[in-house]
Amino acid sequence: MRYGLVLVLITLMAIGIVYNAVQTTVVNADKWNAKAERVLNTVFFVQPRRGDILASDGTVLATNLMRYNVCLDYNANSRSDSLFAANLPQLADSMAKYYHKRNSDEWLEYLAKPLAKPGKDRKRCHVLLKEAKYDDYQRILTFPYFAEMAKKHRQHGLYATPKMTRMMPYGSMAQRSIGRCNYRRTAKFEGAKRSGDSVDVLHGYSGLEAALDSLLYGQEGTAKYAQMTRGVQKWVEQPAIDGYSLRTTIDVNIQDIVECELQDMLQFTHADWGTCLLMEVATGDIKAISNLEKDPTRDDDTYIEAMNRALQAFEPGSVMKPISMIVALEDNFAPIDRAFPIGSTYAYAGGSPIRDTHSPAYLPVSRFLEYSSNIGMTKLIAPHYENNLNGFRERLREIGFFDKFGTGMAGERTPYFPTLDPKAGGRVSLSRMCYGYSTMIPPLYTCAMYNAIANKGKFVRPRMVKEKISSDGTVHKCDISYVRDSICSKKNAQILMDMLYSVVYGEGGTAKSLRNNIVHIAGKTGTCIIANEAKRDSEGKIIPGTGGGYNQGHYRLAFCGIFPYEDPKYTCMVLISNPAPEFRGAATTSGYVVKNIAFKLYAHGLLGKYSDYLADGNAESMPTLFACDKTQIDEVRDVVGAKRSKKLRLPAKPSEGRVPDVVGLGMRQALALIEDSGYRIEAHGNGFAARQEPAPGTKARPGQIIRVEFALR
């Protein structure tokens, strides 16, 4: 009986199997073949790896990094609500200890909130941390409840979902120029046979990331389902091609110097924003670029990386005058020895009088830039183009002033010079254009033109990318290129350099405060007054005294400098907007930024000048040597020679609980000595330690701040 029953059951099962096999392979064959065709022919997207952005020395400025969203599933099958509730206070304390976005009470409320809902309505993805490291996920697994559930081999509901992110190891350094990325939802991949195949891909939306997105992104690959021994699996048909890594011209050390000097000046003057870029004369390489503005979320003078204003167009002010002088010299209507009557005002073509604040009664062309004479530039340029008002703009076009540079940075704009109409005030506008009004020029273009002057007339194209590196390591160099082989003769370029040098070292120079005997700077100041918009009441009427006029406007202060004058290596452009009223000198604001950058580059040996310790000289002219460790003293004596070396003072070994003596040490050594002694340092200035507070040997508690002032000697 039992064997018979088993036989009947096996027979029925066999009949069912045969029936379904016939249904699948014969009766419904077309339906299942069509479904298989759809599945096996579905094209899937394979995302390439985005290339890195590197500094000139190979240091990584932007790269891909895997981050994780750490989530808690409140509907996990075997999780215990009672155990979770019992451990909740300790869990909240642990979260607050390591993750300070919430305190302990806030974490307790956040973790307990989903428990108030019925089980089926609870979140399966309650986010605890966004874009966290995998170490954070591993740490949370050791917290109360999760560790206990793991010991019991029960499901606790904590999981981490990976997400590729774009990271900048140097934070905000040159952030706007490097650019940013975000995920974009793409349309269904070409060739896909079903809906729902759209994916999130990482693309750039600003800076180099956006402008060179196609190079960095690479090419997508494709995959399909394939029938394998163990079922259907994805099979890559066309592998993705990873994006190029780009080696930029940015020098991390120079970038740090530029950002620090710009930020210090902005904080000192309480300005709204500032931009600074440093270009190498011979190559056009942009070695550093910084854009800072006040943090709108704070009330103090905290500055953050901001819009790339080096690429935006502004009224340039007097930094336009050397560019106008290029045209005048090349077209031979600027005899440098000819003196023009200047005076304090000059009304041209019926416009409002043009003013000079400190020019003498007569001034030769060679000193127009030195005194920054608006009247002189007007008398030189405007009459020459009276019968062809747009001729001045066309001459600038011929020398490449309006060509797009293609630096690689997104948002690059060209200068704007309006078309002039003699019946609509064109002559007046022309007279303003030649000294920097009625026109808009990006700081990048001003810097590039000055760079051409320093480069003996060769108009090298500014660039941010010097190499492309493919995924297999092949290097493709980006050659130096020129906007124009020459914008002026070498003779005229030298005349212009001498004019720019007189702005700093001439008797009437507007940048005399930048004089020094360390690095000779040639350059030009530029001041532009921007009228503030007047405030209006509820009826739309202007409120008196709230702006809208020349006298109530704010200042934009520019300086474009070339250094060293004798053998130009760098061109630096600085623009600062709306400083406090007591800071309205372009030389003492933007000019000082250039001067301090030049000093630091000199100190780092980047200007090709080094002290020759072996040169003949008496004891009074010998170089000053500062305190350093024993190894360095031996090295200095080996170089200088025992007979001519000065005896160096070594700081005494600090006693425990006493402030160490760091006077005479460099910043790096002072920092190491103070921190090794258990204290913190607050550093001011640059160079070598000149003063410290508290005094050396003073008793101090561990962790106390030691204030040290550094100065160049």
Image (cartoon, helix red, strand yellow):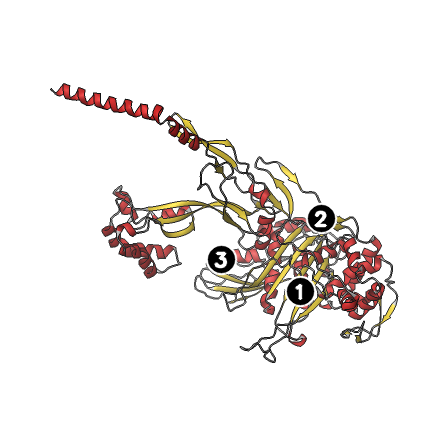
Q: Position of residue 298 (x, y in %)?
A: 50, 66
- The quadrant of the picture occupied by the N terminus is top left
**Depth check: 662 or 299 in front?**
299
Residue tagged by mark 2? 283
The secondary element bearing badge 3 is classed as helix
Task: Give the farthest residue toward the bottom.
Answer: 544
Q: Residues within 10 Å of mark 3 (few under 14, many from 20)?
A: some
**Residue 675 has which mark?**
3
Q: Position of residue 422 (x, y in %)?
A: 79, 66
Q: Nearer the viewer, mark 2 or mark 3?
A: 2
Three-letter amino acid code at disc 3? Answer: Glu
Quadrant of residue 517 in the image? bottom right
- Find residue 570 and report its horizontal and vertical position in percent: 70, 54
Label 2 is placed on what type of residue? Thr
Q: Residues within 10 Å of mark 1 (few under 14, many from 20)?
A: many
Which mark sits nearer the N-terminus, 3 or 1?
A: 1
Which element carries disc 1, helix, strand or loop?
helix
> Could you tell whether 481 is left or right of 379 in the image?
left
Kind of residue sitting beneath label 1 = Ser
Q: Position of residue 645 (x, y in %)?
A: 67, 54
- Report whether 105 appears left or right of 600: left
Real-space CA distance between mark 3 and mark 1, rounded to the nearest whole angstrom: 35 Å
Residue at the spot x=61%, y=79% of the render? Answer: 545
Q: Which disc is residue 590 wearing? A: 1
- Say if 270 sits above or below 487 in the image: below
Q: Who comes first in sequence, dot 2 or dot 1?
A: 2
